[in-house]
Image (cartoon, helix red, strand yellow):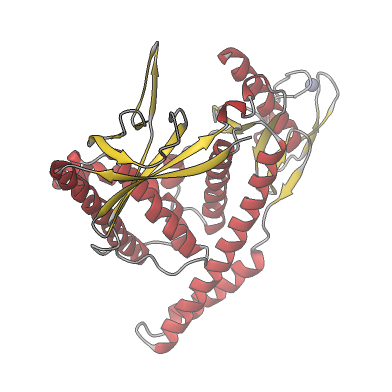
Amino acid sequence: MFIYKTYKFRMYPTNEQVAKIMIFFKAKRFIYNNYINEMKKIEVARNKLEYLYSFEKFHEDLIKLKKEYPWLNDVDGCIIRTTLQDVNDAYEKYYHGEASYPKYKSYYQSQTYKTVCIYHNYRKNKSQSIEVNLAKKIIKLPKLNEVKISGYRKLINFEKLILSVTVKKIGKKYYAQVLVKENWKNEVSTKFSNNIVGIDLGVKNIVTTSDGVKYPGLNISRIQNQIKLLQKRLSSSQPGSKNHEKITLKIQRKYQVISNRRLDAINFITNDLVKKYDILVVENLSVKEMLQKSNSSLSDKMQNSSFYEIIKQLERKAYLYGKKVIKIDKFFPSSQLCSKCGYRNKELKNIDIRTWVCPKCNSHNDRDINASINIMKEGKKIMENNC
Ligand SMILES: [Zn+2]
């Protein structure tokens, strides 16, 4: 196991470094506020349930933004990414009902930035984007190079796994908060673990595992009907009237309830899976493909964003707990193969067939469990080829 720990150093930047730090602060504020502006435009035009996709979209927009504002090219790219992550999280919290609407960042609120440590391992050349050298009393940060530091006189060396650094200006003083993962050498070695699970994502059961455990999907038909009724009332009401506004609010609240329940369920499932298994195998889903289907029905959109969210959370949590997620090719015919003998049954494209008897080996197959076993086996193959 391992723990997270923060080391706080006082920094003594040169005038030149101070000027750069101020630009980084400005970049964070600029990106954050720009994101809110864009979100406000999108919210007017689109269904709120699509908010989960925004992170990818804004990543694409970054390229355009850098052309328009060339000074952004001089900013440590990690700062921009972590800012996008922050504002995206703020929106997720808002839509989950955990926080109020994200607010614009003012000059004084944004006297801080965060940058992530990137490790390069090319042949025998190992390097990392952030380093702390206690003998020289310096911290090496991207685009700033070496900055003088003080603190932790009793520490001899800093051979720790650095995750990120938050630079802060408090009053006239500068600080670097270094987040590290300690004892990380003892973490679960997934490389040789047999504790592997295949995960099938579906409609009736949102998750089915190769151990035969099924997590049922949410039943939202009642609330969906309520929304349909409200939308009918909305279209017959006068735009701009008090009643119109009231119904709009009611609809928003209903969506909020669905969103909360959906995220709660996904949280529960992903926690459960990451705790139980070391290696989790899932089918890869393409975000782009889902976006193209954006004119499909609400339940389709929900389904897609749930799948996307499950994979995202599995990856996030697996990373935190030292576990591993393997994504397999989405064209792998997981539900058509017999998991016992490998026979391929092409009739199974029809999603209504829930169980089937293999014509070759006579085994009775439950569609979802059979698929998840195939996914697990495919993941094992990938593991073995990589070792
Ligand atoms: Zn068979």
Q: Is residue 98 left or right of residue 23?
A: right
- Quarter holding the C terminus is top right
Place of residue 265 in the rendered image (x, y in percent of width and height, measured from the top left): 65, 55
> For the point 85% across and 26% down, which residue is it?
363
Quadrant of the snapshot with the N terminus: top right
Give the image quarter of residue 224. bottom right
Whether residue 351 is visible here, answered yes or no, is no
Is residue 227 something one can see in this rendering?
Answer: yes
Answer with left or right where residue 43 lies relative to residue 37: right
For the point 66% across and 69% down, the residue is: 222
Q: Is residue 252 left or right of residue 282?
A: left
344 lies above or below 163:
above
Residue sitting at the far bottom: 242
Above or below, comparing residue 7 to residue 295 in the picture: above
Q: Residue at x 80, y 33 (%)?
A: 356
Residue 22 location in percent, x, y?
19, 51
* Ligand 1: quadrant of the figure: top right
Is 71 in front, or is 326? Answer: 71
Number of marks in the rendered image: 0
Question: Considering depth in this image, is 163 or 80 the residue closer to the camera?
Answer: 163
Q: Is residue 85 above or below residue 342?
A: below
307 shown above or below 339: below
Q: Position of residue 121 (x, y in %)?
A: 40, 19
Q: Tell me residue 91's x, y (percent).
A: 42, 60
Q: Residue furthest front?
A: 154
Front residue (pair 234, 146): 146
